[in-house]
Structures are given as C-alpha cells and as structure tokens.
Amino acid sequence: MERGSLSLLFVLLIATVTSVFCFTDGMLPNGDFELGPKPSDMKGTQVLSKNAIPSWELLGFVEYIKSGQKQGDMLLVVPAGKFAIRLGNEASIKQRLNVTKGVYYSLTFSAARTCAQDERLNISVAPDSGVIPIQTVYSSSGWDLYAWAFQAESNVAEIVIHNPGEEEDPACGPLIDGVAIKALYPPRPTNKNILKNGGFEEGPYILPNATTGVLVPPFIEDDHSPLPSWMVESLKAIKYVDIEHFSVPQGRRAVELVAGKESAIAQVARTIVGKTYVLSFAVGDANNACEGSMIVEAFAGRDTLKVPYQSRGKGGFKRASMRFVAVSTRTRVMFYSTFYSMRSDDFSSLCGPVIDDVKLLGVRKP
C-alpha cells in the first residue's frame, strides 16, 4: 500500500475514533451546546452543516438559539449557559457514546416547547425508543428536565433526539439543552424491604444547577425506567427531587407527585397469598412553597390508605403505614395525590406531596 493511502487510512481511523465519546456520569460532550457552529455554518439561526455543532450530528432544520433571542413577541430563554438548540419538523440531533453492553442508563435533558401546543420528542438508543410529551409545562420558567432510560445492546450507543412534529412553521419546534447521562444499577430486595429502590436513591442524573427536579414521564415501565424498579402509571409525569434543592424525608432523593391523580407511581412486589404485610412510607413537602391540604392515597392490592398532610411549603414530613393480607403472589403497590397543587410563590408551577422511604415487610406470626 502506498504511503499516501496509509496516511488517508490513518486519518479516517482517527476521525472514526474521535466521533465516539467515552462514558462518564454527567453532561454529554458539549451537552450544553455552549460550543457552537462557525458563522460560516449559519444562516440566521439555522445551522447549515450536519457537523457544525461540536460533538453532535444534525439532521434536518436545526437552529442554534442564544438566550434572550426573540421570536416575534416571544422571548426565548435558555435554562443554563447562553445557548440551546431548537429542532424543526422531523429534525434530529445525535451523538455516539462508548457504554457497557447490558448496563442500564438514564438520559436527562432540558426541553421547552415554543409556539406549538402538542409538542413531543422521540428519544432513541436502538433498539429502545420512547415518546416524551412536553405539552404540559410543570415549571414557571417554561423549561423542564426530563429523564428516559435504555439498556445498552452493544458497547456503543447512538443517542438520538428527534422532533416528529409537522408544524406549518418549522421554527415552532422544541428547544433542547443540558443533555446528560448516568449509569443505573438497579437495587435488589433485601430482608429489610421487599420493595426495590424504596428510598428512591437510585435514579436519573440531576444537573447540579437544576432547581426544578427531574420529570419521569408517564407510561414508563419498570424494566426501562429511569427510576429503577418503579413504574409511572399515569397520564402525567412524577418529579424526582434531591436534597441539594428540596426537602427530602430520608436519604438524598425522593419523589414528588406533581399532578394529582394523573401522577401515579407503582411497583409490583412478590407476596405470599394469605400472609400479612405492612406497607410504610413517609409523606411530606419539598420545601418549595407548595402549601395547603394534601392527601396521598396508597394502594396495596385491594387495600387503600388515605394519608392527609397539611403543608406549609417549608419542608417537613410524617410517617404512615397500613396492614394488608396478600390475595395474590404479586401485589401492586401504588401512590398518587388526591389533589392538584400549585406553588404559592408563582401560582403556575405544578407541585404536590413528596413520598419517600417506602418499605414493605411481612409480619411474622406470634
């Protein structure tokens, strides 16, 4: 082989290697889009070249948005940093990342809808994919953090975020920022708790500067949940909160039920028919100005318990428990909030009671 051909082959190999990034918990390479395209790769806000944004590959109508930019009378705000991207009709961004085959991972990203009302995003890492609705705005800023999980089928994951919208104006697509990843290590049941991940300590990555918590979207099954072992069985999302920004009853993480009966979380546990069990848990508020009367409804098989909690919005919690006799070898444990609540400091952010430290134990016969 001639020397020139060898040099070309070496360059191609280097280009291939550098296009696949190594995995670490946290922000993806240029996941905050602060490294942008060259002016020559732009036409207004539209990015012209598919490789113009470092570390990403673009497909379709993608815009590079600066915080404070206006679209008509609408001010476009970026949640962190100065830049974000917007996906037009059928547009996508993707990145390849080295991962470990068989391991579960959770993606976290910020998203905001613009002028379209029924916006949604397709997230995929082949062969897994999911549709995340973003028409409900949970925070007053207009930006929400979402989580989605996948299991790596090979040692390289191609992460794709796609806008399937078909708006008349391609500039009506969703804004994306702050794409991060975290490896998940699903816990197992122990002799101290039949439920897995009852303290919600294992879950999606929370950006250090994020003060809104992370939404786990509806209809997420337990085998691919960013909140391992739990399912979101509802029309709306639940919120994953941390001790750095919220009040948490136990440990460092908890779940906030932010959309009344439309925001439910569940887990199926193995039980013995005829055996008595005790389900215990903590109910509180997240110290986020979510005030008023709250009720958490807990279900274990056919049994139900309503736990009232009077919130002052400044943190605090109470404990509750219920006894029940298992009528099946598999018992569904589920929680939701009876009422809808809004934060008293902005009257536009959805909020609700926090649940944590959920335990299920069998009762020994005397």
Image (spheres, helix red, strand yellow):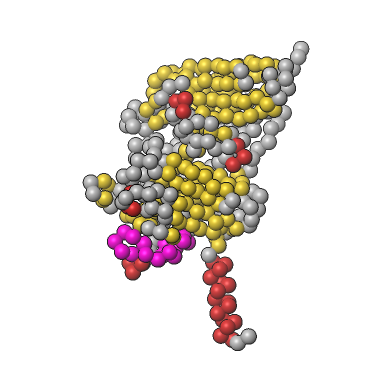
Q: Give the tally of numbered discs.
A: 0
* Residue 293 % position (x, y): 42, 18
Residue furthest left in the image: 73
The image quadrant that residue 320 belongs to is top right
What residue lies at 55% left-to-right and 16% top-to-bottom?
A: 305
Position of residue 58 in the picture relative to residue 202 (left or right): left
Up the image or down, 260 lies above or below 170; here it is above
Residue furthest bottom in the image: 2
What residue lies at 33% left-to-right and 69% top-to-bottom?
A: 40
* Residue 277 % position (x, y): 67, 19
Residue furthest right in the image: 366
Residue 230 seen in the current view = yes
The image quadrant that residue 227 belongs to is top right
Up the image or down, 6 lies above or below 64; here it is below
* Residue 290 % position (x, y): 40, 26
Magenta range: 42-57
What residue lies at 64% left-to-right and 48% top-to-bottom?
A: 103
Viewport quadrant of the N terminus: bottom right
* Residue 296 % position (x, y): 50, 21
Up the image or down, 348 lies above or below 291; here it is below
Residue 77 seen in the current view = no
Viewport quadrant of the C terminus: top right
What residue lies at 65% left-to-right and 16% top-to-bottom?
A: 324
4 drawn magenta: no
Q: Nearer the viewer, residue 217 or 248?
A: 217
Magenta portion: prevailing SS class: loop
56 drawn magenta: yes
Q: Nearer the viewer, residue 137 or 141?
A: 137
Position of residue 106 in the picture relative to residue 331 (left or right): left
Q: Nearer the viewer, residue 245 or 106?
A: 106
